[in-house]
Image (cartoon, coloured by chain):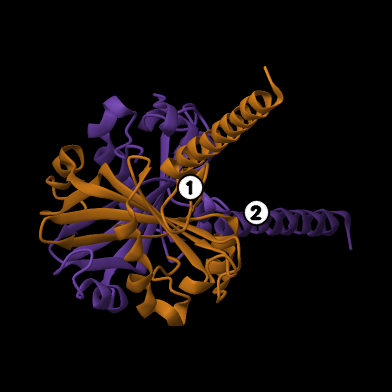
Chain colours: A purple, B orange
Amino acid sequence: MDRRSFVIVLLITAVAMVAGAVATVISASAQVDADAAPIYGIKIPPGYRDWRLISVNHLAGGNVKQVRAQLGNDIATKAFQEGQFPFPDGTIIAALHWNEALSDENNAVLATGFPGAGLQSFVAGAAVNVQFMVKDSKQYAATGGWGFADFTSGKPGNEALHKTCFPCHEPAKARDYVFTRYAR
Amino acid sequence: MDRRSFVIVLLITAVAMVAGAVATVISASAQVDADAAPIYGIKIPPGYRDWRLISVNHLAGGNVKQVRAQLGNDIATKAFQEGQFPFPDGTIIAALHWNEALSDENNAVLATGFPGAGLQSFVAGAAVNVQFMVKDSKQYAATGGWGFADFTSGKPGNEALHKTCFPCHEPAKARDYVFTRYAR
C-alpha cells in the first residue's frame, strides 16, 4: 500500500468510526424518545401510582364517561394542602383517567334500598390515559413553567396532542395553570 | 367524735372518693366514645387523608350525586395490589365521599371543544362523610373480621346507622366483604 492509499484507508476507517458512533448516539436517543413525551421530554415518573390523592372527578358527555383521580408527588401535595401559588419547581401532578364501568356488585346492594333506592355506582374500568404536569420554571418557561405529558398504555401521545396541553390550561393562569383543587 | 361517728365519716369519705373516681372514669369514657363509632369503637385514623389511592367511583340517583375515593393504609394497599384475600389484620380502608359539583372553570375549557364538545366535569364539592373498614379478625369476628365506622364532619354516626354496615357488605363475602377493586 502506498502512502496515498494508506491515508485513504485511514480516512475511510475514521469516517466509518464516526458514523458508527453517531448512529449509536442517534439510536440511543431514539430509544429514550420513545418513552418520553414529545416537546417536553417527560417520561412516566416511577411510583406515581402511590402518590397522594389531590382530588377526584368524573367527566361526562357524548360517548365519554370517565372517573378520574389527580395525585401529587410530595412537593405537589404540600403545595396543594397549603394553597401555595405558584407551585414550586419539582411539583408533579398526575391525572389518572379510567372509563367508568357500572358495578353489578355494587348495584345489587344499592338496589336493596340502602343507602337509597335507585342509586347506581360507576367504578373505574379500563384505564384511558395518564397525564402529568411537571413544574420547572426555567426549562418550561415558554409554557408557564409547566411541562406536559400524556401516556396511553405506557406510550406517549404524539406531538400534535402535546401541542394542545398548554392552550387548554391557559385559562387557569390565575391558579398557576392548574384546574384541580385539593379535596378536603 | 366517738368511734362510731368516726367510722361513719370514714365510710362517707370512702364512698365519696369512690363515687368521684367512678364519675371521672365515666366522664373520660364518655369523652372517648364521642369520637368513636358505636358498636365498633373505631376513631378516625390519624393521617388517613394521605393514604394511597385504591380506586375512585361516582354514585348517582335521585338527589344523590357523589364523587368518591377509596384510600388504603400500607397494609391495605399492599393487599389490594397483590390481590390478597382475606385482607390481613391491620388493614384499614377509608372511603371519602363528596357531593359532586359542576366546575365552571373546567367546563369553560371543555366548551371550547377540546377534548370533546359537550363534555362536563363534575368535581369534588362539600364533603359528605368518611367511612372506615378496619380488619381485626378476633375483635370483629362477629362481622366477618371487619369493624365499620362512619363520620360526618368528624363526628361518628349513631348506632342505628352502624348496624346497617355489615348487612350491606355481606353480599361481597367472596371478596372478604370489600366492594372496591384496585384501579390500575
Chain letter for mark 1, please. B
Q: Quadrant of residue B81?
A: bottom right
Q: How many marks?
A: 2
Which numbered marker is on residue B43? 1
Instruction: Indicate the amino acid at tag 1.
Output: Lys
Q: Can you tell which of label 2 and label 1 is closer to the viewer?
A: 1
Which numbered marker is on residue B125? none
Measured from the top left, where is residue B64 in percent x and y?
Answer: 16, 56
Q: Nearer the viewer, residue A106 or A79?
A: A106
Outermost residue toward the top in this view: B1
In the rendered image, the vertical position of residue B131 relative to residue B6, given as above or below: below
Q: Quadrant of the N terminus of chain A?
A: bottom right
Measured from the top left, where is residue B26 in percent x and y?
Answer: 50, 40
Q: CA distance from mark 2 to mark 1?
A: 58 Å
**Element class at badge 2:** helix
Q: Nearer the viewer, residue A36 or B151?
A: B151
Q: Nearer the viewer, residue B38 or A109?
A: B38
Q: Quadrant of the C terminus of chain A?
A: top left
Q: Quadrant of residue B57?
A: bottom left
Q: Quadrant of residue A142?
A: top left
Measured from the top left, where is residue A47 in percent x and y?
Answer: 57, 53
Q: Nearer the viewer, residue A107 or B1?
A: B1
Question: Is residue A152 among the parts visible in the rendering?
Answer: yes
Instruction: Indicate the amino acid at tag 2.
Output: Val
Question: Is residue A150 among the parts visible in the rendering?
Answer: no
**Element class at badge 1:** loop
Residue tagged 2: A25
In the rendered image, the vertical position of residue A5 relative to residue A117, given as above or below: above
Q: Judge from the rendering whether residue A156 lies leftward or rightward of residue A114; answer left or right.
A: right
Chain letter for mark 2, please. A
